[in-house]
Image (cartoon, rainbow, N blue to C red):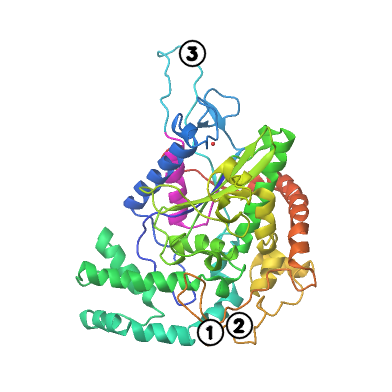
Amino acid sequence: MVYVVTRHGARNVLPKDAELQENDSTGGPSLLPQGITASRAAGEAFRVRYLAHPACNRSLTCLASEGREGYGIVNAKGVGFSNFNTLARSSALDRTLRSATAFLSGVFPLQAVPRAPLGMSPQVDVVLAQTPPIYTVPDANDWLIRAYTKCEAYQRRLAAWYKSQEFAAKEEATRGVREGLAQLEPQLNVSLVNWWNVYDAFNVWRNYGTGDIMPAISDAQFKQVASIADWLETAKMRSNLTGNSLGGPLLGDLIGRLQAAAQHLLKGEKTRLGRLLLVSAHYNTQLALLSAMALDTALTPAQLPWLATLPATSSALAFELHFDPSSRRLAVRMLYQDGPGQGYMPVPLPQCASPGGVRPNGDVDAAEALAGPGACELSAFVRAYGGAAIDDAGTWCTVCENAQMEACVAARARGRGGVFAASGFANDNGSGGVSSDSGGGNGGGGSGEKVKVAMAVVTSALGAGALAAGAVLWHVRRREAKWEREAAEKARAVQLHGSSVPL
């Protein structure tokens, strides 16, 4: 099984305010032709790693047997992927929906369809190339992929961070670069808070020739512009600001689906096993997931560059579930691909893996022996990260203090939302829980005292160990019921088929 979270391809200019809110144009900025091409290339690279024989054999990552790499009707010739084991979801925006279609067209390319002579029935099995449906929900109700646009508690903490000593120091350190651009284009708002819009305008114009005409700057100047944007956008997604409020829902979905797949593998129910799960999303989604796992405090940018630089367009964050039938061991491995031209690189999971993957007696860690460097056993993965997972809308609404979203209104009506918790941060004093010298993790560049996060649903006296242990059984039971509901509701979901091409 592979659970992959992608960033959309290159798109038109995307203006955002300081709280990550976008304009109300339907579907947002459109995906550019270059974005379609790159997302398809990312899908092709995914196919090479996980579907194409013999390449996937060399990496021991094949999701289907040879000759069954297509998507289509169950039991049809050449089909190994169908709606029973493949799920593609996207935020409800042009750039992600069309990126998902392009990505899937690379994973499941067009097949030649045998044609019979005119007036005669074909004498061979005909399998029409198909693209998996892409499921979505209206953006106003999307708390799984775009929680970062709807979390009032996070927005309050972000506003407080803009007033911190760390932010003021960065303003001073970048003043020369920002004022230099202002001299070239006096109409530009070159404040550090607004820097995303400055960077995005230059980036889209320089690379794709669209958007507002921007003044010519040297490559060295643009590198400075991009460096400031990298710092700003990754700092916004640090765990001391986000906690699990933005990435917790996706982490809950990931863990639940890993556990459901594990149950089916252990029971030998391969027909019910989810193989390919795609989430077409945004860089904020990817970074929020990393922060929910607190990887920004556990790793350095040398181990995971996305802690200090923005994920490339059409990038991918993949979670592999490996199973050894003889030992019945299950291992999870996390990898990132920083754009379709790059390789899949493993991400260490220090919270659950043995240091260096070697036990005291010199034996290689069992999980790494099964799945490769950086892997850890599924049970250890759940213990390490299950406490940060958010499994239902009511919990997320409470953590984020959202009372407007439809799911939040419904949760409160059912009595599940209750009175909003303070903010999910142990030292929240009403100012957003960010001290004046708040710093980040290893990739954040700050040196101040880290804000401690009280993860969702954790105001009780349960210890972390008890919570993690209970999370394993709790997730399994809840998810089994949820999958049954999803199967019934799937036919009513919004299905958007791509016009290009088709685990």
Name the amino acid, label 2.
Gly
Q: Nearer the viewer, residue 493 or 235?
A: 235
- Residue at 61% across / 38% down in the picture? 85
Please report the bounds of the magenta region as a residue range: 88-109
Instruction: Give SS at disc 2.
Output: loop
Q: Is residue 310 magenta?
A: no
**Are the two marked residues, 1 and 2, in contact with CB atoms closer than 8 angstroms?**
yes
Mark toward the start of the polypeptide (3 vs 2): 3
Q: Dot 2 corresponds to which residue?
A: 433
Image quarter (top left, top right, bottom left or bottom right) of the N terminus: top right
Instruction: Give SS at disc 1.
Output: helix
Q: Nearer the viewer, mark 1 or mark 3?
A: 1
Q: Quadrant of residue 248?
A: bottom right
Q: Residue 284: where, in percent of width, then height? A: 49, 64
- Judged left or right of residue 337, residue 256 is right
| Disc 2: CA contacts within 10 A as few (<14), some (14-19) or many (>=20) | many
Please tell me the numbered disc located at residue 160. 1
Q: Is residue 245 above or below residue 121?
A: below
Image quarter (top left, top right, bottom left or bottom right) of the C terminus: top right
Q: Residue 136: where, in percent of width, then height? A: 56, 53
Q: Quadrant of residue 202?
A: bottom left
Q: Is residue 13 above or below residue 118?
A: below
- Residue at 39% across / 44% down in the picture? 40
Q: Residue 441: where, in percent of width, then height? A: 52, 72
CA–CA distance in space, label 1 to label 2:
8 Å
Q: Dot 3 corresponds to which residue?
A: 121
- Residue at 40% across / 14% down in the picture? 118
- Judged left or right of residue 51, residue 275 is right
